[in-house]
Amino acid sequence: MSLNNNPNTNLIKTITKLLWGSSLPPQLLISTVRSTWSATWQLMMSQLAPSDPTGSYTRPTSQFRLNFKSPPKKQLHLYVGLPCPWAHRTLIVLALKGLEDSIPVSIASPGVDGSWEFRVLPDPDKEKLAPCLDKANRCKTLREVYNLTRGGYSGRSTVPMLWDVENKEVVCNESYDIIEFFNSGLNRIAGNPELDLSPPALKDEIKKWNDIIYPNVNNGVYRCGFAQSQEAYDKAAEGLFKTLEMLEDHLGESRYLCGEVLTLADVCLFTTLIRFDVVYNVLFKCTKKKLIEFPNLHGYLRDIYQTPKVAETCNMGQIMEGYYKILFPLNPGGINPIMPSGCEDEVLSNPHNRDSLPLEAKVVQHSVS
Ligand SMILES: N[C@@H](CCC(=O)N[C@@H](CS)C(=O)NCC(=O)O)C(=O)O
């Protein structure tokens, strides 16, 4: 998310000069201001959201992948940020598996340039996780932590990041690797080792869902918000809403994606759905429908929210603050809007009535045509 330098200053100077010092005819003045703004916007977007020649957002790949053949055995530390849906996955699995006492967490806050830094909230919500200082390395920024790794690091300093405390190195910064590892690789120290969010019998089904949901929904909302051409946006929005409609149908018959049990695929879908009406619908132009207009998806969202230990990981205030204050090119005034109705704790705690849905795991063919 980080903007390396701040082109806004130049933009403001240029526009001010044009408006006050110019003898250009008004029409020409306006079109010059528009093209200056547009060029600056594109520069900012290319730093925030790299795109391909068609203007489609291309997410950079994670640099540190977990080696499942020789998983880490040392003391670990988890770095997250509360607005981030990828980090949120790791917090949920950590809590559900009862790993909170074994793997301490440092919660970073987004800084003005979008990079992660450590500071405390003056008035934290006692019920929820809140930003804090770096408990493992006492660094001021996440970039400093990444740089402690032998040989330094010049890539993006993203959350979530799993850290090897003893060797002072990054173990992994890919959320799906981290949640798979928390689910099955740490049962000797987990408070809830019996819970398996990726049981062998459902692995194929989970993969099938992830392969649909990741590009169209999890990354799909970013592909809408970060699109730099109309075509790229149209394609992303179409894939997103077709997939949501298909999920709405499926979740009318099945309590969770793979039937009666919560799996990693649900965790991954949940962290996007909970941000949908508060952020993506508005800021990322995912406007065709609000999540609250999908009754089954909204019931499913409430169902997972009410799963013990999940609500504490969801801090709506921090989610909004993170996205609206930081993504400058998408929200130049930095105004944080009112929370839409339906997204408050009270509404998410309303009955979901999903316990009575068919309990048999259904293996069905899913496709988005
Ligand atoms: N592929 C990564 C994506 C992580 C990611 O993009 N995190 C964002 C926050 S939502 C980040 O830390 N961005 C900081 C930056 O790019 O400088 C994963 O799933 O773990």
Image (tube, rainbow, N blue to C red):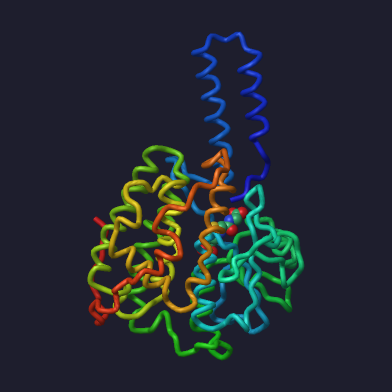
- The percent coordinates of residue 175 (x first, y second) are 52, 68
Q: Quadrant of residue 267?
A: bottom left
- The percent coordinates of residue 2 (x first, y second) are 62, 49
Q: Quadrant of the C terminus?
A: bottom left
Nearer to us in this view, 339 or 104 = 339
Q: Quadrant of residue 6?
A: top right
Residue at 50% across, 47% down? 337
State whether residue 96 is above or below residue 37.
Answer: below
Residue at 68% across, 75% down? 164
The number of discs equals 0
Report whether residue 61 is seen: no
State whether residue 21 is above or below residue 10.
Answer: above
State whether residue 254 is above or below residue 229.
Answer: below
Ligand 1 placement by image quarter: bottom right
Report whether residue 89 is seen: yes
Image position of 1 (left or right of 133): left
Which residue is the extreme one toward the front? 346
Residue at 63% across, 45% down? 3
- The percent coordinates of residue 147 (x first, y second) are 73, 62
- The percent coordinates of residue 72 (x first, y second) are 62, 81
State whether residue 9 is above or below residue 73.
Answer: above
Nearer to us in this view, 93 or 123 = 123
Residue at 64% across, 59% down? 109
Nearer to us in this view, 28 or 204 = 28
Image position of 220 (left or right of 25): left
Nearer to us in this view, 195 or 315 = 315
